[in-house]
């Protein structure tokens, strides 16, 4: 009579402890069953394999990034469990081939479990940055398990004849697995990589990208939470340095430098000091003014509006990136404003100009808040109504730490 599932689980636990003891005193020991498979009853090998499948299938459901890929892996593992239970109920083939196939399956499932454990407690921002790599790893380990399952089934064809169609479908699906990275995650990565390539290291871009990432992975946009994610990146960078992975270290350094510029990565005192400096600047302007006119250098010669993502041509003139791309894309080979013929149609990010425009926008934000204070102090119904409407609009600003800045400015209004 075959032992019950519970008794097999107990056997698996005892033999796993035995194996760990064996490996502890044999540093050069080969993976789990090698060298011991010949002395273990095949039923115990099966029990250990089942135990590993159950453990990994449940753990794979707990990963927070690229959930779909891990859920598919988990689903396949639960399907494999049904195959193993069928082997448990029938007379398992005792041949060396069956033993080796079962050993290989357990080893591959253990690799999957190692993969799950590897990513279970990593920072969520880091996991999104590595999402392409993670999906590829899950795909590869799924295919490997599918191959091992195929070998196991070939060694037990007669025993598994009753569920041959189901097994054939399962192993084919696993061996041909094609996992796709979440499209929204890819869009964020493309935006981030483009920003790094074009040296967009200004505060505005940092705020924008950090908000995108936080929303995608379910992290609250608060300084304490963002700093935790940055600390995670720093730990990953240290580990990459220990592994001497120079390209990875450089990439993580860029990410850390960029995200550290975001408002949400800074503490309240730092933000307050920065806005005190801006307060001193806007005090030079009329208290009734709601904005500071843009400098001429901020205006794109093509769109006639303040530049977005300014770039400089080979002759030094600057335009919005999208506008000049469309200009050259239409076949033009001249400077749009000067009419100068350009032999070199390349352009590069104008970081200094972009930072100046961002600071001008921040100053205008402060000007608008100060204007609200002035209107509220008039105590005129129409002025108060207008001020409240402006406050609502300001609160809709799509910049992470405007909430913190706005709360501080409201405190200034109150006093």
Image (cartoon, rainbow, N blue to C red):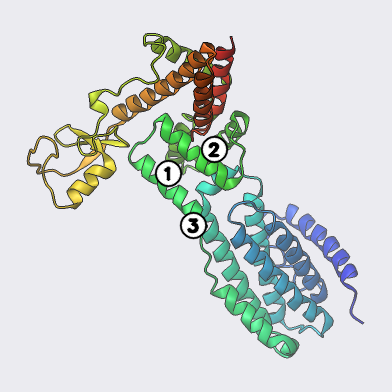
Instruction: Tell me if label 3 and label 2 are in contact, CB under 8 Å.
Output: no
Residue 381 to residue 24: above or below: above
Asked if marks 1 and 3 touch (Cβ < 8 Å), the reply is no
Q: Is residue 380 above or below residue 168?
A: above
Q: Which residue is mark 2?
A: 233
x then y, percent, for residue 202: 39, 30
Decide which of 358, 101 is in the foreground and name it.
358
Left or right: 155, with 283 as reference point: right
For disc 2, the neighbor class at 10 Å (few under 14, some 14 to 19, many from 20) is many
From what the image shows, is residue 129 above or below residue 354?
below
The reply to whether discs 2 and 1 touch (Cβ–Cβ < 8 Å) is: no
Question: For the residue labelled by badge 3, is the local secondary structure a helix, a strand or a loop?
Answer: helix
The numbered disc on residue 192 is 1
Label 3, on which residue?
183
Q: CA distance from mark 2 to mark 1?
A: 15 Å
Q: Give the residue displayed 73% in from the left and 83% down from the top.
A: 95
Category of crowding for the residue at label 3, using alpha-carbon neighbours closer than 10 angstroms: few (below 14), some (14–19), many (at least 20) = few
Q: Give the image location of residue 38, x and y in percent.
A: 76, 74
N-term mark: 1 or 3: 3
Residue drawn at (77%, 56%) of the image: 20
Residue 157, given in percent of the width and then of the height, sits at: 70, 88
Please state the horizontal and vertical placement of residue 174, each as a whole percent of the image.
59, 73
Mark 1–mark 3 Cα distance, whole angstroms, equals 14 Å
Which numbered disc, 3 or 2, marks the residue closer to the eye?
3
Asked if residue 208 can be seen in this view, the reply is yes
Q: Dividing the picture into quarters, in which one does residue 9 lie?
A: bottom right
Residue visible at 43% across and 41% down?
A: 251
- If the image is split into quadrants, where does the C terminus sit? top right
- Tell me the element at label 1: helix
């Amino acid at each position: 009579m075959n032992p019950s599932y519970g008794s097999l689980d107990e056997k698996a636990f005892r033999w796993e402890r035995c194996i760990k003891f064996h490996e502890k005193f044999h540093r050069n020991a080969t993976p789990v069953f090698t060298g011991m498979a010949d002395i273990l009853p095949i039923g115990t090998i099966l029990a250990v394999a089942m135990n590993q499948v159950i453990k990994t299938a449940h753990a794979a459901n707990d990963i927070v990034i690229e959930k779909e890929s891990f859920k598919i892996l988990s689903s396949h593992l639960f399907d494999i469990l049904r195959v193993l239970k069928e082997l448990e109920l029938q007379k398992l083939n005792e041949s060396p081939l069956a033993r080796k196939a079962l050993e290989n399956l357990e080893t591959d499932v253990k690799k999957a479990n190692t993969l799950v454990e590897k990513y279970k407690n990593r920072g969520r921002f880091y996991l999104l940055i590595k999402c392409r790599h993670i999906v590829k790893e899950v795909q590869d380990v799924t295919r490997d398990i599918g191959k091992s399952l195929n070998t196991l089934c070939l060694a037990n064809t007669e025993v598994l004849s009753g569920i041959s169609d189901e097994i054939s479908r399962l192993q084919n699906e696993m061996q041909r697995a094609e996992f796709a990275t979440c499209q929204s995650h890819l869009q964020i990565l493309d935006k981030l990589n483009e920003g790094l390539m074009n040296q967009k290291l200004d505060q505005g871009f940092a705020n924008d990208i950090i908000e995108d990432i936080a929303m995608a992975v379910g992290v609250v946009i608060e300084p304490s939470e963002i700093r935790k994610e940055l600390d995670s990146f720093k730990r990953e960078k240290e580990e990459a340095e220990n592994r001497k992975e120079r390209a990875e270290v450089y990439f993580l350094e860029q990410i850390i430098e960029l995200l550290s510029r975001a408002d949400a990565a800074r503490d309240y005192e730092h933000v307050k000091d920065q806005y005190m400096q801006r307060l001193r600047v806007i005090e030079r302007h009329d208290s009734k003014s709601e904005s500071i006119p843009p400098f001429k250098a901020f205006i794109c010669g093509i769109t006639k509006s303040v530049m977005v993502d300014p770039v400089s041509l080979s002759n030094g003139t600057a335009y919005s990136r999208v506008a000049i791309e469309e200009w050259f894309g239409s076949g033009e080979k001249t400077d749009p404003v000067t009419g100068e013929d350009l032999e070199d149609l390349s352009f590069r990010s104008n970081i200094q100009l972009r930072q100046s425009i961002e600071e001008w926008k921040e100053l205008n934000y402060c000007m608008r808040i100060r204007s609200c204070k002035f209107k509220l102090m008039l105590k005129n119904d129409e002025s108060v109504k207008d001020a409240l409407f402006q406050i609502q609009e300001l609160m809709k600003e799509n910049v992470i730490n405007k909430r913190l800045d706005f709360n501080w400015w409201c405190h200034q209004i109150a006093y």
